[in-house]
Amino acid sequence: METANETDAENRNWFLFLEIANVMEFQPDLYDQQTWGKYTPDNGQMEEFQALFGYVPYDEQDYNWTKVEDCGTALCLAGHAAMLTGWFPTRGATYNERPTVSWASVCRQPGQDYVHGENVAEVAEEALGISPEEASHLFSGGANWKPDEIRAFGRGKQILPPLDEEDVRDNEV
C-alpha cells in the first residue's frame, strides 16, 4: 500500500533504476554503497596517473583522477544516478597542495568548485523520480541492496518498509 511519502511506478525513472542495477550486477567493483564516490584504480591506472601528472597520488580522492579515463570510479546508488544523468564530481578542499574530488556535491560542468555544486542525494532523488523519504532510505550507507531489488523499485515496488501499528503514535493517526 502506497503512503503519502511513497511514489508510484509512473513517477519513477525505471530505466535509470535498471542501469544502476546492471552496474551492481555486472560491474560490482564500480558499486560501493558506503561512499558517494571514490576512485579505485588498478596498478596500470596508477602508472598512467603518475605519467600524466608526475607524482603518485596520496589517495583515491585526488581531483586529477577525474582526468584519467577508465579510472575505476566506485559510486553508491545516488552517485550512479547522478553520473548516469550527466553530472560530474566537484573540486573539494585542498589536501597536500592538491584539490580533492567530491561526489557529495555535483555539477553539470566538470571542474567546478564544491560550493557551486548541488547535493548529490537531491540530484539523484529527482533523477530517479522518488520522494525525499524514499531517497533517505534508498541511499543509506548501511543498506545492502541487491540488483533485483533495485529493478523492482524501478518497476514500482514500495521502497519504504511498511509501517506496523507500533510505528504510529496515537496522535499521528
Image: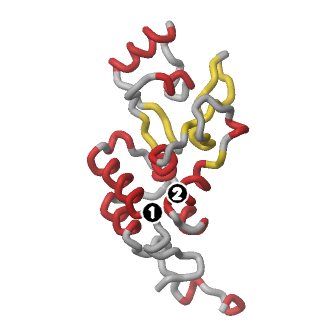
Residue 34 showing in the rendered view: no
Q: Earlier in the sequence, mark 2 or mark 1?
A: 1
**Label 1 SS:** loop
Image-quadrant location for residue 61: top right
Q: Residue furthest left?
A: 26
Q: Position of residue 2 (x, y in %)?
A: 50, 83
Residue 88: x and y in percent read: 55, 38
Q: Residues within 10 Å of mark 2 (few under 14, many from 20)?
A: some
At label 2, which amino acid type do we have? Ala
Residue identifier under label 2:
127
Q: Residue at x 57, y 36 (%)?
A: 89
- Position of 93 with respect to 39 (left or right) is right
**Residue with the mark numbered 1:** 13
Label 2 close to label 1 by CB (< 8 Å): yes
At a point 38% along the width and 28% down the height, the residue shown is: 70
Q: Amino acid at mark 1?
A: Asn
| Secondary element type, mark 2 | helix
Quarter that holds the C terminus: bottom right
Q: Position of residue 128 (x, y in %)?
A: 49, 60
